[in-house]
Amino acid sequence: MDRDKLIIIGGGVGPLAGLLLHRLIIENTPEAARDQDHLRILHCCLPDLVPDRTEALLQGTPERPALGMARIIQAALKTAEELDFCSVIGIPCNTFHAPAIWRIFQEALGDGRGRFTLINMVEETIKDLSRQFSRRPARVGILSTTGTRESGLFSMALTEAGMIPLEVPGAKQDLIHRAIYDPRWGLKATAAPSAEALGVVTEAAERLVASGAEAIILGCTELPLALSDPFLQDVPLIDPMTVLAGKLIGGQPK
């Protein structure tokens, strides 16, 4: 772990997502007995500059959130340069990692050239799962927003890694999306998970377990708010943001 680096969180992509990532980094930083022992974190939360990622994918405008976030990170990197820090960067939004968005974002940032390392939360999650199920093709369930699902973000990555993706039926997907986005009871709209959201998400996860899932990816950063335990019926619930926090803690600029 390099304590001389600066962790940059590209927030504003879920009301609590950036805050949760920040907290995970603090809680999992080893040997941090004093304030000064903790890692440097620059948490940039400018939600009005990053349009909704699902809408962007469904409307065919992935450049809008990609370039909005790139603008934020570029400003953060200027601060890092003024302080003479190298940086490691994480974006706490699964849908933002859809190839159509992520590719434009990467291109806009350009080559780090030793100044920064960009961590891809989805790629790191798939690597961790591949190590966990290295001896056989595991059946892995996916819970996500509709944008993430239609982009094939997790299903394609799992297939390429030799695993078998499992998804809920289309009608249930609509309910999961509502459980995240509904303006009255969705996870994005409430400080604590509503009973409606908890019911929908739990039922969907149980359906995946019944279908033979050996692990379930919580493919939206709000979903761990509803499924906070690490297991459901002995099946591990994989939170990509926990993976991201670990990589940011351990990651070193190139």
Image: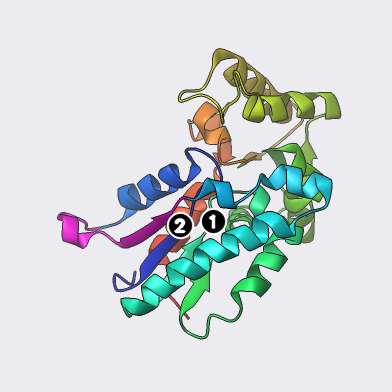
User: What amino acid is found at the position of numbered circle 1 in the picture?
Assistant: Ile
Q: Is mark 1 on a helix, strand or loop?
A: loop
Q: Position of residue 85 (x, y in %)?
A: 34, 76
Question: Residue at point 78% right, 36% down?
Answer: 167
Question: Residue at point 58% right, 65% down?
Answer: 70
The residue at which mark 2 appears reads as 9
Where is 146 relative to 89, above or below? above
In-front residue for pair 63/133: 63
Q: Return the residue found at the far bottom.
A: 113
Where is 188 relative to 95, above or below? above
Which one is earlier in the sequence, the residue at label 1 or at label 2?
2
Q: Where is residue 171 in the image (x, y as percent from the top left)?
A: 83, 24
In-front residue for pair 68/197: 68
Q: Return the residue found at the far left.
A: 34
| Residue 165 falls inside the magenta stretch | no
Q: Residues within 10 Å of mark 2 (few under 14, many from 20)?
A: many
Compute the Cα span from label 1 to label 2.
6 Å
Question: Residue at point 59% right, 54% down?
Answer: 125
Start-end of magenta stretch: 31-45
Residue 250: which quarter of the image?
Answer: bottom left
- Whether pointer 1 and pointer 2 mark residues with C-beta atoms closer than 8 Å, the reply is yes
The residue at which mark 1 appears reads as 91
Where is 3 relative to 237, above or below? below
